[in-house]
Amino acid sequence: MLEVRDEVAAAVAAGRPVVALESTLLAQGLPAPRNREVAARLERAVRDAGAVPATIAVLDGVARVGLAGAELDRVCDPAAGLVKLSRRDLGPAMATGASGATTVAGSVALAHAAGIGVFATGGLGGVHRDTVWDVSADLGVLADTPVLVVCSGAKSVLDLPATLEQLETRSVPVFGYRTDRFPAFYLRDSGLEVPWRAEGPEEVAAAVLAHRRVASNGSGVLLANPVPVEHEMDRQLHDRLLVEGEELVRRRGVRGKDVTPALLAYFHERSGGASLAANTALVLGNAQLAAEVAVELARGRR
Ligand code: PSU
Ligand code: MN
């Protein structure tokens, strides 16, 4: 029920660098046909930096770590109707033969099961605003799974101070990549500080190896890499769309796992391409950085 692609399994066995990638950002986070183009560019970015990419999804009940081109086509095809799978959904999906795209939580769990220690995404899930109990399972998985998660901070649609507090409570170290500020997905600076800062992939790799030796809860590490300056969204446009998007979500009664996709879709529809440009650029930057760290980690192990 867990199928690791040959190329990925061989790299893991040999201790060569591998980067896991999620599929929810493709199936539920980006519109077609842009999602398929991004899927290919992500894998290319990982390869160009010297690592093997492993995009993750559950197809017909099989948890797949590493997807072939036709499988990526399917994940990115809106007509294929893939559902969104968090970690708790993996077992039921596998047992019932379902097909779904995996979130950060679902993907990191499967990456770890396949022996992969480095993962890249766009924005981490976190604590939602205006609700007491909507806390992304992404935080719980980071708390108990020893995987490095490279992202552009948490999505700006979240309660970011509460999200950072949760990461502290759960003993997840947070690094800013060449920044002192926690990024907010479409924006480079949430106004909040990160506890640690790294200037290069070697530094991150050293911290990951040290953390693994002492993290008594088996927690992961979060590396927050801001969207490139030239692709950052205009703050005023961003803030306006966020208020409108939240209002829409409230009015339509969108709940639970549908909230994040609904908000992202609203941004993509209304920002005249700005949110798509930002999302594409940031996720590509994260895939590349994750591969650079994976290369350093593989070197450190030898
Ligand atoms: N990054 C993106 N787009 C996305 C996501 C991340 O650029 O759509 C997804 C991730 O899969 C993350 C999910 O796990 O959003 C968070 O969903 P929720 O808030 O329901 O936990
Ligand atoms: Mn949620």
Image (spheres, helix red, strand yellow):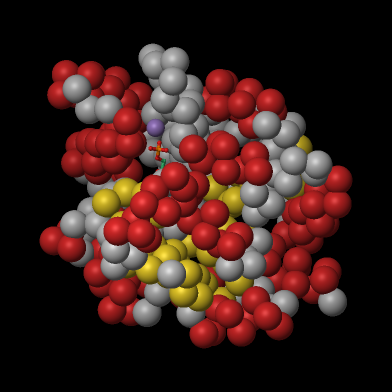
Image side of residue 158 versus residue 172, left or right: left
Q: x, y (%) of residue 33?
A: 21, 63
At a point 70% along the width and 71% down the height, the residue shown is 295
Whether residue 282 is visible: no
Instruction: Quadrant for the C terminus, please.
Output: bottom right
Q: Is residue 286 above or below residue 170?
A: below
Residue 201 can be seen in this image: yes
Number of labels in the image equals: 0
Quarter assignment of residue 139: top right
* Quadrant of residue 173 within the rendered picture: top right
Picture layout, residue 236 above or below residue 173 = above
Q: Is residue 204 left or right of residue 245?
A: right
Residue at image x 22%, y 19%? Answer: 250
Q: Image quadrant of residue 241? A: top left
- Going 42% across and 66% down the picture, which residue do you hit? 63
Q: Quadrant of ligand 1?
A: top left
At x 61%, y 71%, the residue is 18
Figure quadrant of the N terminus? bottom left
Q: Residue furthest front?
A: 95
Front residue of this view, candidates 18 and 58: 58
Q: Is residue 160 left or right of residue 102?
A: right
- Residue 288: x, y in percent? 56, 64
Front residue (pair 24, 225): 24
Name the one closer to the observer, 134 or 228.
134
Which percent across, then down, holds residue 215? 80, 43
Locate residue 86, reporting x and y percent: 42, 46
